[in-house]
């Protein structure tokens, strides 16, 4: 029997968290399947050392394209050109993409243009905000892929409403939760909370990285002033994204940071340490997507500083609240959490740590292997 190659595409650190359980599940399909982990190099993260891959229990990438950063059009084109050469050499039976970064779009397009089947893990998510580059990536990727693995019922509904054939849609659950479940021993071993001198349930965690939040002086200044106000009531821990770190050193921002003694500004953290902080925190304030899912599973209140979310199930069933970007609304929302008015936890169906097994089962049937 001929060996069938599956390319798994990653472009940024969150993609590795999603790919890890899928990689392990596909390994169980046996010797008839060969896996290639392809890192486009869209984002370079200095914390992605050997220990990062060890924590996630996956090997270092088999292929590193080293594309680097750039504007959306140039970066997407560079990824397509670099990946096409690699794809033509390996001729995989399936290309599996994750999430909504430029690498997701670029490699799915490259695959289908070369008549190679493509699958999308985390399909069907929609914010309905076309000003977000990620929304364009999600929509186009879903419309070119052959296999669409959704995490929740709203994903199925979105795809059907857009006219996608039902036989392409497979609701499997949330692979981010697979990684979180598998990493529980690693998270429990972390001592970062005590190392920082913090008490469990007596601090908040903050993440900010979206251009709309950090790339405009007015928005970032307002957010920093808001954090200064919140930190007068409760300490904050802020693992700082590299883009945000650069902006904090510019103009008036550095002076505001100096006035925030109760905010712990940290470099990006290893997976286990970050999730330990989230688990131990009183709340998370974020503009990210994946953290909305992790906090829902952990039962930690999540305040999302955005007007919309592509993960509405974390609001309707989980612990997430959309608080917008107005300083007064954010401060009020934090106050409600501290006053014990956070939403109750409910974990969505199929967020059970076995989504990757379901993905592997579908792929085995589709490719006739395993």
Image: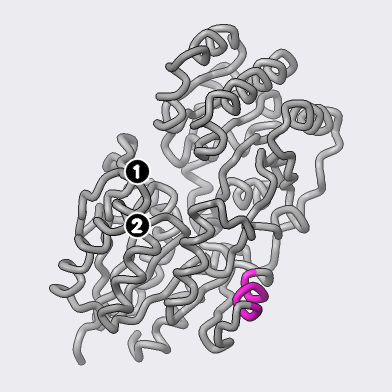
Q: Which residue is mark 1?
A: 52
Query: Dot 2: what SS?
Result: strand
Q: Which residue is mark 2?
A: 10
Q: Main structural element of the magenta stretch: helix, strand or loop?
A: helix
The question of residue 194 being in magenta is answered with no
Residue 36 appears left or right of 288 = left
* Residue 331 drawn above or below residue 9: above
Residues shaded magenta: 155-161
Q: How many marks?
A: 2
Say which label, 2 or 1, has the lower sequence index: 2
- Can residue 188 be seen here? no
Q: Nearer the viewer, residue 229 or 211?
A: 211
Query: Dot 1: what SS?
Result: helix
What residue sits 70% from the left and 24% below the top? 202
Instruction: Pick the quarter of the image with the C terminus.
Output: bottom left
The quarter of the picture where residue 226 lies is top right
What residue sits 59% from the left and 64% below the top? 125
- CA separation in Å, label 2 and label 1: 14 Å
**x, y (%) of residue 151?**
59, 67
**x, y (%) of residue 30?**
30, 79
**x, y (%) of residue 214?**
52, 31
Q: Residues within 10 Å of mark 1 (few under 14, many from 20)?
A: many
* Mark 2 or 1: the one toward you: 2
What residue sits 30% from the left and 41% below the top? 44
Instruction: Pick the quarter of the image with the N terminus.
Output: bottom left
**x, y (%) of residue 362?**
46, 82
Q: Nearer the viewer, residue 204 or 76?
A: 76
The quarter of the picture where residue 5 lies is bottom left
What residue sits 64% from the left and 46% below the top? 295
């Amino acid at each position: 029997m001929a060996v069938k190659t599956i390319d798994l595409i990653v472009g940024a650190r969150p993609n590795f968290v999603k790919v890890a359980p899928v990689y392990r599940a596909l390994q169980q399909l046996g010797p008839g399947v060969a896996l290639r982990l392809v890192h486009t190099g869209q984002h370079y993260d200095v914390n992605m050392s050997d220990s990062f891959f060890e924590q996630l229990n996956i090997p270092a990438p088999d292929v590193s394209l080293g594309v680097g950063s750039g504007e959306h059009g140039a970066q997407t084109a560079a990824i397509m050109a670099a990946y096409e050469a690699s794809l033509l050499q390996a001729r995989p039976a399936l290309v599996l993409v994750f999430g909504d970064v430029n690498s997701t779009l670029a490699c799915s397009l490259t695959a289908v243009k070369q008549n190679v089947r493509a699958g999308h893990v985390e399909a069907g998510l929609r914010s309905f905000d076309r000003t977000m580059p990620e929304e364009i990536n999600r929509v186009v990727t879903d419309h070119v892929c052959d296999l669409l693995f959704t995490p929740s019922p709203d994903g199925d509904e979105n795809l059907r409403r857009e006219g996608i054939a039902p036989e392409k849609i497979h609701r499997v659950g949330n692979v981010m939760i697979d990684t979180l479940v598998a990493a529980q021993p690693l998270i429990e071993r972390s001592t970062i909370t005590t190392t920082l001198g913090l008490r469990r349930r007596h601090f908040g965690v903050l993440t900010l990285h979206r251009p709309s939040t950090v790339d405009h002086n007015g928005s970032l200044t307002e957010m920093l002033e808001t954090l200064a106000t919140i930190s007068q009531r409760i300490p904050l821990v802020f693992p700082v994204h590299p883009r945000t770190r650069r902006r904090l050193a510019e103009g008036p921002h550095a002076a505001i940071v100096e006035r925030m003694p109760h905010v712990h500004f940290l470099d990006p953290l290893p997976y286990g340490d970050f999730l330990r902080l989230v688990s131990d925190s009183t709340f998370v304030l974020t503009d990210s997507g994946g953290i909305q899912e992790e906090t829902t599973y952990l039962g930690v209140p999540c305040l999302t500083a955005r007007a919309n979310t592509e993960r509405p199930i974390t609001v309707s069933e989980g612990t997430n609240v959309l608080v917008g970007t107005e300083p007064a609304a954010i401060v009020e929302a934090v106050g409600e959490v501290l006053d014990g008015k956070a939403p109750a936890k409910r974990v969505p169906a199929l967020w059970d740590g076995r989504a990757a097994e379901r993905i592997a089962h579908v792929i085995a049937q589709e490719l006739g292997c395993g």
